[in-house]
Image: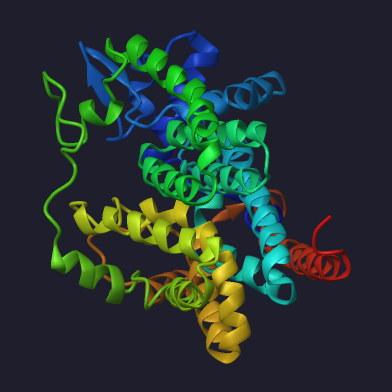
Amino acid sequence: MGITVGTLVHPYMAQQASRYALTASIVERGTVRLDAYEHVLGVDRAVWRGHIYSDKAPGQPLAAVPVFALGKAVGVEGATNLRVDRNLGLWWVTFWCATVMGALLLVMMWRRSSKVVPKHATGAALGVFFGTLLLPFSALLFGHVMAGALLYASYLVLDRDTRSSAVCAGLFAGFAVLVEYTAVLGVAALLIVVIWRYRSRLFPFVAGGVPAGLVLAVYNTIAFGAWYRLSYQLTAFDGIREEPEGVLHMFSSPALSNVGTLLFSGRGLLIATPVIVIAVAAAVSQVRRDRHPDAVLAILMFGLFVLLPVFWENPWGGDSPGPRYMAPALPFLVVPTGWALQRWPLLARATIALSALTMLAATFTDPLISRFETGGLGIWLNQVFDGEVVDTLWTMAWGPVGWVIHALLSVVLLLVSIRWTQSEPPFP
């Protein structure tokens, strides 16, 4: 996976700029103010008392501080230079904060499915990862994959029968919210499971989330003058405001049109990533049988996170290859995908193949197509045929020959990975 998407060098855009500039400002200037980076920022910014800040949750930019500092030490270009294309500083941070986190998440998904559906663990893990938004967002500097990895790690640790593991699970869950505020829905789902199955661990789990809450409170106080004031309340996307908006100002009443768009548009769940739909169906079927915790949690996660595109003004969350705010819930569909491969093998494989084709096309072209576009796979395939593909480290070094190197390495490593997962014992 690191070769397949880790060598892609996507352009410098507004979301990435807001995150990258915050990391750079902490390292280069010792402040969370982004005034000195105004010329490299897009619309994704917050403004408070005449100063500019990132309008993103601070977890991912904070986590990138040592990575960026190391990059600076070895000569990576700083963030004050606006280099839209072939920005290796942005690539460096993206690799460690998105691609590596995606690789760790893929391993966790495989290990969990190896325990529950060992015969289909590899297919399920690869199908969910390469057939959903997890793939393109592992090549972009967003917080969704990191938040999803932390939530999934929280669940895996929680499944160990000790109080200390419950504290660790709470720690992971808390930092998921620090990375993406909307991950609080995932924490709510985990809390339901804790109350249902691990009631004695409820207090340790909640206590584990306190450090992340303290970090957020300190950041908010430094940046916005109050521990409870979030950057989203001061976003300047629609213009600078004198007073903070309400915490839930970005939500509206549920829109039936959003439901139709979410399901049936070119980037909808049924059209672009049908593996999600068949995984949810398998989870529902399993709950009817035995209320397996992976099935229950998959339904809880999907049900809570699907509310975001339904209530959001734009179901995609801006320019995106799909409903991006749902991404942290997707790892929890891996075991249900294994069940789908058991029960409906032909249908499951077909949906995985279509989903993977769509997400690969998006990842290697321009995943962040306009929120006003209704298409999906057709747009990305046209870009492929027109040669509008993303730069890679290989093509930057050797031109078109780099694609041959990229393809060969990806295929070889994929085959080696599949062979290794099939030969290793499923779980220690």
| Residue drawn at 28 percent across, 68 percent down | 262
Residue 270 to residue 389: above or below? below
Q: Residue furthest front?
A: 200
Residue 61 to residue 269: above or below? above
Q: Is residue 7 visible?
A: no
| Residue drawn at 13 percent across, 49 percent down | 252
Q: Position of residue 126 (x, y in %)?
A: 64, 67
Q: Position of residue 100 (x, y in %)?
A: 66, 44
Q: Is 242 left or right of 335, judged from the image as shown?
A: left
Q: Residue furthest bottom?
A: 346
Q: Quadrant of the N terminus?
A: bottom right
| Residue drawn at 77 percent across, 67 percent down | 408
- In the depicted view, which residue is nearer to us: 318 or 331? 331
Q: Is 109 left or right of 243, judged from the image as shown?
A: right
Q: Is 266 left or right of 6, judged from the image as shown?
A: left
Q: Position of residue 251 (x, y in %)?
A: 18, 46
- In the depicted view, which residue is nearer to us: 172 or 384? 172
Q: Is residue 230 visible?
A: yes
Q: Position of residue 38 (x, y in %)?
A: 33, 22
Q: Is 356 left or right of 267, judged from the image as shown?
A: right
- In the depicted view, which residue is nearer to us: 376 or 201? 201
Q: Quadrant of the C terminus?
A: bottom right
Residue 345 to residue 174: above or below? below
| Residue drawn at 27 percent across, 35 percent down | 43
